[in-house]
């Protein structure tokens, strides 16, 4: 079952100053994402998502629906983290942005959960 979500993220260069281009490329790639682009990235990567819409006034915030199932809170948490992490790792990988150069800080709120999940994604 799909539940509405609000995801915000921040892409940080954690490497040397010349690695800033990798972080910028990752940030740009995430900003350009639409559900159709997610479908084109890889089979199954879009499955947990129904809709992926950027907010018009907040550059690094996305809303949509996500399938986290109807199980326990830990199960829902795990499914949400896996969905976002898999997607963002693919973008990091495509930009050769390794953990020693780029980290994506995320916070997601899902309407069926009573907590904000904060986590980092690196490749």
Image: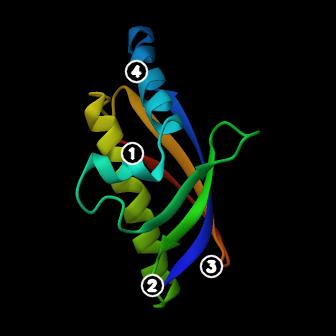
Q: Earlier in the sequence, mark 1 or mark 4?
A: 4
Under circle 1, the secondary element is: helix
Q: Earlier in the sequence, mark 1 or mark 2?
A: 1
Position of the C terminus, as image quadrant, is top left
At horizontal 67% and vertical 36% (from top left) the residue drawn is 59
Give me the disc on residue 15.
Answer: 4
Marks 1 and 3, how far apart at CA: 27 Å
118 and 54: which one is in front?
Answer: 54
At horizontal 39% and vertical 15% (from top left) the residue drawn is 19
Q: Nearer the viewer, mark 2 or mark 4?
A: 2
At horizontal 51% and vertical 30% (from top left) the residue drawn is 12
Q: Residue furthest top?
A: 18
Give me the disc on residue 113.
Answer: 3
Marks 2 and 4, how far apart at CA: 37 Å
At horizontal 50% and vertical 30% (from top left) the residue drawn is 27
Q: Earlier in the sequence, mark 2 or mark 4?
A: 4
45 and 9: which one is in front?
Answer: 45
Percent position of residue 31, x then y? 53, 36
Tell me which corner region of the image, top left, top right, bottom left or bottom right, holds residue 103: top left
Percent position of residue 24, x then y? 48, 22
Q: Nearer the viewer, mark 3 or mark 4?
A: 3
Residue contact between numbered discs 1 and 3, judged by CB atoms under 8 Å = no
Q: Earlier in the sequence, mark 1 or mark 3?
A: 1
Task: Determine which residue is flagged by label 1.
Answer: 37
Percent position of residue 76, x then y? 47, 79
Above or below for 65 versus 11: below
Under circle 2, the secondary element is: loop
Q: Nearer the viewer, mark 1 or mark 3?
A: 1
State left or right for residue 84 relative to residue 123.
right
């Amino acid at each position: 079952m799909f539940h509405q979500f609000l995801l915000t993220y921040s892409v940080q260069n954690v490497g040397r100053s010349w690695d800033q281009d990798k972080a910028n490329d990752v940030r740009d790639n995430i900003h350009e994402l639409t559900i159709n682009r997610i479908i084109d990235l890889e089979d199954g990567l879009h499955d947990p998502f129904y809709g992926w819409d950027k907010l018009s006034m907040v550059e690094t915030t996305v809303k949509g629906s996500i399938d986290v199932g109807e199980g326990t809170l830990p199960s829902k948490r795990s499914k949400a983290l896996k969905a976002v992490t898999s997607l963002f790792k693919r973008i990091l990988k495509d930009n050769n942005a390794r953990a020693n150069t780029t980290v994506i800080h995320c916070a997601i709120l899902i309407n069926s959960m009573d907590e904000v999940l904060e986590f980092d994604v690196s490749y």
